[in-house]
Image: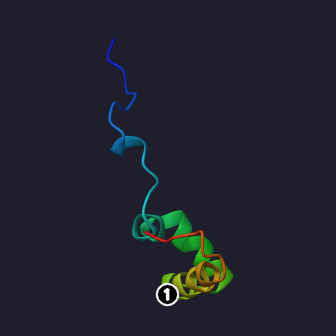
Amino acid sequence: MASNTPTTVEAWAEPSLDELFAEPIVQLIMERDGVNATDMRGYLNRILSRVPSLTMQ
């Protein structure tokens, strides 16, 4: 029986913001909340500027 378990580190990597923002469910939630990807990136950049130990990739 073949396993569907990823075998590479990349398979377990966190999705990028672009990948998250492209997800239909994320788009629906952002639309419901009245924000868009540009708004969210702005919010994240403001947070990152206040917490030097964080980085956005």
Q: In the displayed structure, would residue 24 be above or below residue 46?
A: above
Which residue is found at the position 40% from the left and 70% from the top?
18
Numbered label tally: 1
55 sits left or right of 4 in the view: right
Q: Farthest residue in the top direction? A: 1
Foreground: 10 or 30? 10
52 sits left or right of 17 in the view: right
Which residue is found at the position 47% from the left and 65% from the top?
20
Which residue is found at the position 51% from the left and 70% from the top?
55
Residue 56 percent across, percent down from the top left: 49, 71
Residue type highlighted by circle 1: Thr
Foreground: 5 or 55? 55
Q: Secondary structure at mark 1?
A: helix
Q: In the displayed structure, would residue 38 be above or below residue 32?
A: below
Of the 4 image quadrants, the one containing the C terminus is bottom left
Which residue is found at the position 37% from the left and 32% from the top?
6
Of the 4 image quadrants, the one containing the N terminus is top left
Q: Farthest residue in the front direction? A: 52
Foreground: 9 or 55? 55
Residue 4 percent across, percent down from the top left: 37, 27
Q: In the displayed structure, would residue 40 be above or below residue 19?
A: below
Residue 43 percent across, percent down from the top left: 61, 84
Foreground: 25 or 43? 43
Q: Quadrant of residue 2?
A: top left
> Which scheme is used to colour this image of the protein?
rainbow
Residues packed near mark 1 inside 10 Å, few (<14), some (14 to 19) or many (20 plus): few
The residue tagged 1 is 38
Q: In the displayed structure, would residue 19 be above or below residue 10?
A: below
31 sits left or right of 23 in the view: right
